[in-house]
């Protein structure tokens, strides 16, 4: 219970990684972007180096940037920047990864790379994605929650929710009767 007075909110936050809708890279190198959280934890250079490589690999970016870790992160494409932000979040080994519309500003090829990576990440992490893209939710989610005006309408296994929603409001949204 995160509302329990005994729970330290700082410790809870350290277990959560966040990726925003638009890439939020720091104005520094690719390496420094990923190393940031590890340095906050006062890790040794060796641990930081291993964490950077591991995180870039998990984010599907290592092969594209391995020779250019000192390159400015802002020089990366939009899709690469988004995967860099994911690598930065993964570097601190969060228990939960929150992603707010992680592909909304990406082209179809970059979107596919991020979706493939999410599919792999959900084997190791709890990944929670906010999306308005129902096709994307159907492709990558094991469970789907439908929220309307700040209220949880329905939560179900993704296939069940899309094929046989229990709530009329969910059905209307899925079928495009409103949106």
Image: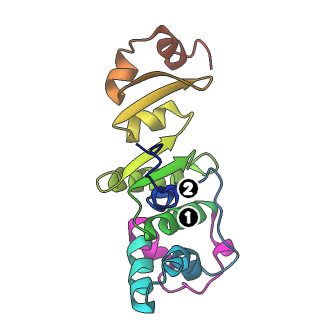
Residue 112: x %, y % from top left: 47, 51
Q: Place residue 70 in its image quadrant.
A: bottom right
The boundaries of the magenta stretch are 56-77
Q: Marks 1 and 2: in contact by CB < 8 Å? A: yes
Disc 2 target residue: 19
Query: Residue 35 in magenta?
Result: no
Q: Which part of the image, by quadrant, shows the N terminus?
A: top left
Callout 2 secondary element: strand
Q: How is the image coloured?
A: rainbow
**108, 171: nearer the viewer:** 171
User: On the image, numbered disc 1 is attached to which residue?
Assistant: 85
Front residue of 127 and 83: 127
Q: CA distance from mark 2 to mark 1?
A: 6 Å
Is 15 on the left or on the right of 10, as rendered?
Answer: left
Q: Position of residue 170 (x, y in %)?
A: 48, 16
For disc 2, the neighbor class at 10 Å (few under 14, some 14 to 19, many from 20) is many
> Looking at the image, which residue is at 47% across and 38% down?
136
The numbered mark at residue 152 is: none
Q: Is residue 162 left or right of residue 26?
A: left
Kindly identify the residue that appears in the image at 38 percent across and 38 percent down: 141
> Which quadrant of the figure has residue 56?
bottom left
Tell me where residue 9 appears, x and y as whole percent: 51, 55
Q: Earlier in the sequence, mark 2 or mark 1?
A: 2
Q: Position of residue 122 (x, y in %)?
A: 34, 51
Direction from residue 37 to residue 44 in the image, left or right: left
Above or below residue 56? Residue 150 is: above
Residue 60 magenta-highlighted: yes
């Amino acid at each position: 219970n995160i509302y329990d007075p005994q729970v330290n909110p700082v410790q809870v936050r350290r277990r959560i990684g966040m990726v925003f809708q638009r890439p939020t890279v720091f104005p520094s190198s690719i390496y420094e972007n990923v190393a940031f959280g590890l340095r906050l934890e006062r890790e040794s250079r060796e641990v930081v180096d291993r964490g950077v490589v591991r995180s870039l690999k998990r984010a599907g970016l290592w092969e594209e940037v391995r020779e250019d870790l000192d390159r400015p992160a802002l020089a990366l494409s939009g899709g690469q920047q988004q995967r860099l932000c994911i690598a930065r979040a993964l570097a601190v080994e969060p228990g939960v990864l929150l992603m707010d519309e992680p592909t909304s500003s990406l082209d179809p090829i970059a979107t596919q790379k991020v979706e493939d990576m999410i599919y792999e990440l959900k084997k190791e992490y709890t990944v929670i994605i906010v999306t308005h893209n129902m096709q994307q939710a159907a492709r990558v989610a094991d469970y789907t929650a439908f929220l309307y005006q700040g209220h949880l309408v329905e939560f179900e296994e993704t296939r069940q929710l899309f094929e046989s929603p229990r709530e009329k409001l969910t059905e209307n949204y899925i079928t495009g009767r409103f949106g």
